Image: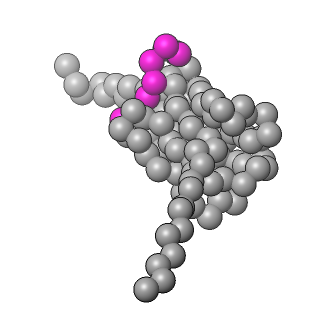
């Protein structure tokens, strides 16, 4: 009986964490998104908040980040500028401006 054991190897090419521009020491995990354009496989969302890109070919990619409390923003990532041994990238996103409405009749 011939059996073929083929090893499948995946490579973490890019790990993106979203951070609040106003408080850059904290990562943003809740109710945020990261869209990637020109990529066949969408990123995997890890419990740490990182968006993981597996087997991503080298190149330049447009990423759009945002969320319920954050403005939608575009970023350009060039994987050639990312160290393959430590493919971690921090993207800083801005909070949405909160607008309060005031009614004359609310006293």
Query: What's the magenta region?
Result: 24-30
Say whether residue 2 is left or right of residue 59.
left
Residue farthest to the bottom, as pictured: 1
The dominant secondary structure in magenta is: loop
Residue at 54% in and 61% down:
8
Q: Which coloring applies here? A: one colour
Residue at 53% in and 16% down:
24
Residue at 66% in and 32% down:
85
Say whether residue 95 is left or right of residue 59.
left
Image vertical order of residue 57 relative to residue 13, above or below:
below
Q: Inspect this view and state whether residue 35 appears.
A: no
Quadrant assignment, res 41: bottom right
**Could you tell me residue 69's position as x and y percent?**
42, 33
Of residues 85 and 64, the one drawn nearer to the viewer in this rendering: 85
Of residues 96 and 92, the one drawn nearer to the viewer in this rendering: 92
Of residues 64 and 6, the one drawn nearer to the viewer in this rendering: 6
**Could you tell me residue 86's position as x and y percent?**
63, 30
**Could you tell me residue 97's position as x and y percent?**
49, 27
Residue farthest to the left, as pictured: 107
- The tally of labels here is 0
Quadrant assignment, res 88: top right
Specify the quadrant that holds the C terminus.
top left
């Amino acid at each position: 009986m011939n059996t073929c054991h083929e090893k499948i190897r995946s490579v973490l090419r890019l790990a993106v964490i979203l951070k609040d521009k106003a408080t850059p020491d904290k990562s943003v995990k809740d109710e945020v998104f990261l869209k990637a354009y020109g990529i066949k496989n969408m990123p995997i969302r890890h419990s740490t908040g990182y968006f993981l890109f597996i087997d991503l070919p080298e190149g330049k990619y447009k990423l759009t980040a945002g969320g319920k409390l954050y403005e939608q923003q575009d970023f350009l990532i060039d994987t050639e500028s990312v160290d393959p041994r430590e493919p971690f990238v921090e993207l800083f996103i801005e909070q949405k401006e909160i607008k309060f409405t005031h009614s004359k009749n609310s006293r």
